[in-house]
């Protein structure tokens, strides 16, 4: 799947989940909390592709996520790709093929999603304010890039960066610390997981079972049979999948808004 579809799927899962929690568990969230969770989950759903680097010196290539903050994030992507490749080679078994590129390895595994979720919460707990602002800044930038792809291309990375910074600071000022910080970690972890599920229906597949060895392979790629797989940028992805995600998101937003509006009026 392409970046915008990944981001949209993350936003959809978070919105639908928030609606379900509100509806069936009575777990209410303020509009700001829902907005922040949705943005972080949308950004998180782009995060694993930070292993897809481009050409740093020429400022070209790379996934949506790797281009969010211009050359700086392209450089980070290069480093993550190399680390992933290192982990691949360090843990590969005799039947795993040789690789020259780390894309779709370490960052596309379940231990990675857990690590990201836990790490985010731990960073916020340990460093407080500055960690929260930094994480929000990065994730809101990703979400803007992913969800408003065309607009972000026209606006350029400087505008996206400034907007992310403003939104991150505003959120920091208004986000309650106790409940808000663990939520950031959860949204990151869920976002990464949704990304992996998205890649799972594509032809190349993902090493979803790593690090469980099967038949002398640690990095078996799981995906659908060829004729059922989704090609990146295909009509099915762009029209059907994104259409379904959009409809579910809008329904969830309406479902979340109705009780709030109702409470507002009945409370006088
Ligand atoms: Zn991916």
Image (spheres, rainbow, N blue to C red):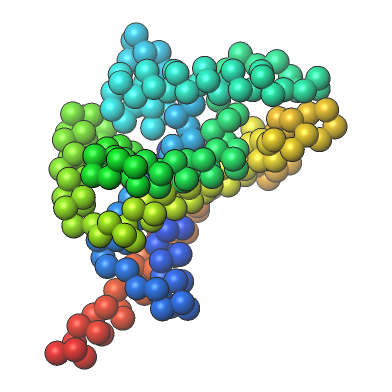
**Where the C terminus falls, by quadrant?**
bottom left
**Nearer to the camera, 102 or 153:** 102
Whole-percent x, y for residue 15 in the image: 40, 62
Quarter-wise, where is residue 219 in the image?
A: top right
Residue at 44% x, 41% y: name it. Answer: 119
What count of labels does the image hold?
0
Whole-percent x, y for residue 105 in the image: 60, 29
Is the residue 164 above or below the residue 90 in the image? below
Residue at 58% x, 47% y: name it. Answer: 197
Is the residue 64 above or below the residue 74 in the image? below
Question: Can residue 2 be spotted in the picture?
Answer: no
**Nearer to the camera, 257 or 26:** 26
Whole-percent x, y for residue 45 in the image: 45, 44
Is the residue 148 above or below the residue 254 in the image? above
Residue at 64% x, 22% y: name it. Answer: 88
Is the residue 104 above or below the residue 141 in the image? above
**Nearer to the camera, 90 or 242:** 90
**Nearer to the camera, 240 or 44:** 44
Identity of the residue furthest to the top in this view: 57
């Amino acid at each position: 799947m392409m970046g915008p579809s990944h981001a949209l799927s993350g936003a959809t899962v978070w919105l639908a989940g928030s609606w379900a929690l509100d509806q069936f568990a009575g777990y209410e969230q303020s509009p700001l909390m829902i907005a922040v969770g949705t943005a972080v989950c949308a950004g998180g759903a782009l995060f694993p592709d930070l292993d897809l680097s481009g050409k740093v010196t020429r400022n070209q290539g790379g996934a949506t996520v790797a281009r969010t903050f211009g050359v700086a994030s392209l450089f980070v992507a290069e480093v993550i790709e190399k680390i992933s490749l290192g982990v691949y080679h360090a843990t590969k078994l005799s039947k795993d093929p040789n690789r020259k590129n780390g894309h779709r390895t370490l960052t596309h595994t379940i231990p990675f999603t857990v690590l990201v979720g836990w790490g985010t919460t731990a960073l916020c707990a340990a460093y407080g304010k500055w960690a929260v602002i930094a994480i929000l800044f990065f994730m809101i930038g990703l979400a803007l890039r992913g969800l408003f792809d065309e607009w972000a291309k026209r606006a350029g990375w400087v505008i996206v960066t400034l907007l992310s910074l403003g939104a991150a600071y505003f959120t920091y000022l208004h986000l309650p610390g106790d409940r808000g910080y663990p939520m950031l970690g959860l949204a990151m972890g869920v976002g990464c997981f949704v990304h992996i599920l998205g890649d799972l229906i594509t032809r190349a597949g993902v090493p979803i079972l790593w690090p469980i060895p099967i038949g002398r392979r640690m990095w078996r790629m799981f995906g659908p049979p060829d004729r059922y797989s989704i090609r990146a940028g295909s009509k099915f992805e762009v029209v059907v999948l994104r259409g379904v995600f959009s409809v579910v998101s809008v329904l969830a937003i309406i479902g979340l808004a109705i009780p709030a509006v109702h409470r507002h009026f009945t409370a006088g």
